[in-house]
Image (cartoon, helix red, strand yellow):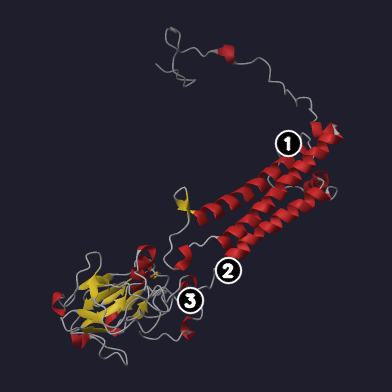
């Protein structure tokens, strides 16, 4: 049974469960216990302890600066790409040495600066109990003036002006902490070709893909080559290049691991077959299709999503990310959405064995726009 008034469940064995229990109601209002007596910290009363704490804080800020420098050194010393010539990536406990060094050094830099700030606040900043009464949301002008006064007082009591050692070491650690940010900016604008030797890894840069003349177009995942007769009108399939590189006496690299995945992902394409009469080839592309089969980059030119939502009747290809729509019958021009340029087209032909192959690489960079893209003199291979 439940007490109707108090909404509390009845105690087991309580016969008079409907009567409220008044024993818990105090007769008098609870008296404000006030603040406990203030306890002074060692650093408040002992100048030696104060100086010790000051040195401790400065040491923590100094360690933070050292770790930030180690971050920069790690960035320059460890090669994320394993030397770019097929060497294996250096590892520590099974993890990439570069990632470990960068993560540990930056983590320690942030940790030391954080601990230093906490110690500064706990041991050296002003230590007063403050009672603040509730008041309307908008502060009065007097309160605002008082806030400014308290902030100034806080700055004064933090000792930032009086303690040049702490202040300067903090400024040093925060300043050096900017170095990792600046160093990482170095990667902006650098093309993959500069990071990875494009001669050693074909198609590594932004300007080219791995497609070369005569390279077979194969179904993605299964890797089977494709004959024109394999596609019905209206069909669209995902495809990729059949990447075969031999190691010759000059030591040409075999694409494998992450380099192979990069090459394949950049070179991903869609094949679509339509009635040849529906195709409106752009000038100079009259011989890029085979029996109404056209091949376009699968990477959206907006921000690079893989794209393959096909509207069979209209030949429109829709990007699922932001709905850019390309007309595959009209040189993949943009008919809707934020993409700024058509999908690059791969010229097709048929080889002696009757399989679809590329005539060359794409004639323009695939993927999203990037600065200087339009000034690149992209050439076929
Ligand atoms: S990535 Fe395709 S529309 Fe944005």
> Which of pointers 3 and 1 indicates the residue nearer the eye?
3
SS of the residue under disc 2: loop
For the point 46% across and 13% down, the residue is: 18
Residue at horizontal 67%, vertical 43%?
115
Residue linked to disc 2? 186
Q: Which residue lies furthest to the left in this view?
A: 229
Question: How many callouts does the rendering have?
Answer: 3
Seen in the image, is 164 located left or right of residue 260? right
Q: How far is the residue under mark 2 from the one under mark 3?
A: 16 Å
Chain-order first, disc 1 or disc 2: 1
Name which of mark 3 and mark 1 comes first in the sequence: 1
Q: Earlier in the sequence, mark 2 or mark 3?
A: 2
What residue is disc 1 on?
133
Look at discs 1 and 2 and give the one toward the viewer. Answer: 2
x, y percentage for residue 140? Answer: 76, 47
374 vs 307: above or below: below
Q: How far apart are marks 3 and 1 (CA)?
A: 57 Å
Give percent across and percent down for residue 312.
22, 74
- Looking at the image, residue 78 sits to the left or right of residue 123; the answer is left
In which image quadrant can residue 289 be found? bottom left
């Amino acid at each position: 049974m439940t007490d109707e008034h108090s909404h509390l469940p009845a105690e087991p064995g309580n016969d008079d469960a409907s009567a409220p229990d008044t024993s818990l109601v105090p007769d008098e209002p609870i008296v404000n216990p006030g603040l406990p007596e203030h306890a002074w910290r060692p650093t408040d009363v002992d100048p030696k302890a104060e100086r010790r704490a000051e040195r401790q804080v400065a040491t923590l800020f100094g360690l933070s600066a050292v770790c930030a420098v180690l971050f920069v050194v790690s960035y320059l010393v460890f090669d994320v790409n394993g030397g770019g010539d097929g060497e294996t990536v250096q590892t520590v406990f099974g993890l990439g040495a570069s990632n470990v060094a960068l993560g540990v050094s930056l983590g320690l830099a942030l940790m030391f600066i954080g601990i230093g700030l906490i110690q500064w606040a706990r041991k050296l900043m002003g230590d007063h109990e403050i009672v603040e009464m509730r008041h309307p949301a908008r502060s009065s002008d007097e309160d605002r003036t008082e806030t400014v006064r308290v902030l100034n007082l806080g700055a004064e009591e933090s000792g930032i002006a009086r303690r040049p050692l702490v202040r300067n070491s903090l400024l040093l650690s925060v300043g050096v902490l900017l170095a990792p940010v600046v160093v990482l900016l170095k990667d902006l604008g650098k093309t993959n070709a500069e990071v990875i030797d494009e001669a050693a890894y074909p198609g590594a840069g932004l300007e080219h893909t791995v497609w070369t003349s005569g390279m077979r177009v194969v179904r993605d995942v299964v890797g089977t080559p494709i004959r024109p007769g394999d596609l019905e009108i209206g069909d669209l399939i995902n495809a990729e290049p059949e990447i075969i590189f031999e190691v010759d006496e000059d030591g040409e690299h075999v694409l494998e691991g992450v380099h192979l995945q990069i090459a394949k992902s950049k070179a991903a394409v869609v094949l679509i077959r339509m009635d040849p009469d529906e195709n409106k080839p752009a000038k100079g592309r009259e011989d890029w299709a085979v029996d109404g089969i056209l091949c376009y980059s699968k990477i959206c030119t907006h921000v690079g999503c893989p794209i393959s939502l096909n509207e069979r009747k209209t030949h429109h290809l829709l990007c699922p990310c932001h709905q850019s729509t390309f007309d595959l019958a009209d040189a993949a021009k943009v008919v809707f959405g934020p993409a700024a340029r058509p999908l690059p087209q791969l010229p097709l032909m048929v080889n002696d064995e009757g399989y679809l192959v590329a005539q060359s690489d794409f004639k323009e960079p695939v993927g999203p726009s990037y600065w200087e893209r339009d000034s690149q003199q992209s050439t076929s291979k």
